[in-house]
Image: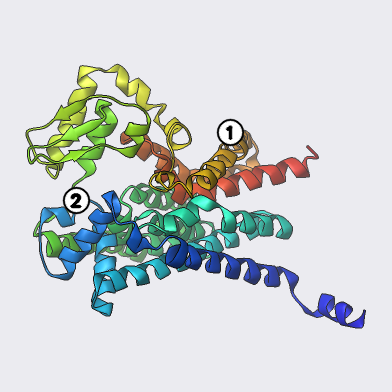
Amino acid sequence: MGFWRFLRKNIDWVMFWELYLLSVGLLIRFYHVLIAHPLTDYLYSDTKNYFDAAERIMFGTQGYYNVFTQPGYSIFISFMSALTGDMYKGVVFVAIFQGFVSILAIYLLYRVAKKILSKNQALVYLLVMIIYFPLISYSGFLMTETVGFILVSFYFWVLMNQMSVRIKLYIFSVTSFLPLLFRPTLMLGILLCAAYLLWKEAKSKLLRNIKLWLVLVVGFLGSGMITVYLNFNISNKWILTPLNGGLNFAQGACFIKEYKDSNGWGFASPSHVQRNFEGTKYFDKPFYDSGHFYMAGIGCYFEKPRRLLYKLFEPYYLFFDNNAWPGSDNSKEKPVLSSSLLVFAFFVIPALILSFFQIKEKKNRSLFVKLWIFPLTLFVSTVMYYGDVRYRIPYDGIFILVAFWVFRLWRKMGI
């Protein structure tokens, strides 16, 4: 009895469970990415494109195809491969990195959860995030979703942290090259965060601080210059964003299953295949001619203006009518993946809707806005381009946290 009394008095059980859950989560992910689902066994489609681009970068081959998609991930793979002297060994280190950053992202979200939930509720949230299978699944693919998850979690943590507004703005500006290289649509979230913080400080002396504005301008411009330089170094093209933006826009505007360019390349979005789109659209320009495809997408809207109305409902496809490809192609993963997404849909989505009732509560309004800034950027980019469950996965930690927050408010009200 004395021993157990000693443990209860002298051990921080909350910290114990934190370390235990995080350790278990890390072991689960390492097992998944190294044994159950090694990245090197699943090099096809998008994963193969990242691998091939990394190989070209590693051996100094320039070309537009190195920046067709977000180049940051391929640059990172090539860097890890250069350290090991072998592409496949480099991918193994990328797998270990993805397992680690997945847990790091969860830890950052948990730090936020501890501020808005009770200790026990925050621990339950941590448990849910540790076992949430879509995050585990994507850590086992050579894709940007896991990097997107850590970036979303990091910037969300910065926004919710108690650090000064000045420091937050500095972080958003000087690190903005990361989303430009890995997740360009996340830039909207960073800009919205900066705008929100500046708006909140509108009546303070902070906005009259010349040094602040100088750092913001230099930070954002410097990040842009870093991105342009890295893109030029691997492609010989002065560009800020990936070249597939136009194709993605046209896909979202034209409602066609398959697209073929002047080089004979073909592309069909997994989301549109699952949504049973039909037909093939041919273009007389290559896919990397982003401007041409943006104009083609605008042309589709002029051809059928009602599609602009349909696009307002595009966020529906972030949640329904398509699976989290490519994990959904794996017969072993699909049942667990589908079950996780189903539970998310029927438990989290109602809570997300009910969270909007907190707008009228003045004491909760500021927290509501901060919780929804990054999900809002996801919805805006989805309307502009198109919806796919896998694009939502990096934001699921925030969505689940919003649901926990709503459940906590219900409990406090005795519902």
As drawn, which residue projects farthest toward the front? 331
Residue 238, x across and y down, in percent: 12, 56
Instruction: Identify the amino acid type marked 1.
Output: Ile
SS of the residue under disc 1: helix
Asked whether 254 or 181 is in front, the reply is 254
Which disc is residue 68 wearing?
2
Q: Which residue is mark 1?
A: 353
In the depicted view, which residue is nearer to us: 344 or 45? Answer: 45
Badge 2 amino acid: Phe
Write down the quadrant of residue 231 in the picture. Answer: bottom left
- Position of 364 with respect to 2 (left or right) is left
Q: Which residue lies most toward the right here?
A: 1
- Comparing 30 with 346, the one in front is 30
Q: Quadrant of the C terminus?
A: top right
Element type where label 2 sits in the image: loop
Res 266 label = none
Quarter of the picture holding the N terminus: bottom right
Q: Is residue 312 above or below residue 37?
A: above
> Counting other residues with Cα less than 10 Å from the Cα at mark 2, is it few (<14), some (14-19), or many (20 or more)?
many
Where does the image place residue 389, in percent across and percent down from the top left?
A: 43, 41
Residue located at (7% from left, 37% from top): 262
What scheme was used to colour the molecule? rainbow
Is residue 283 in view?
A: yes
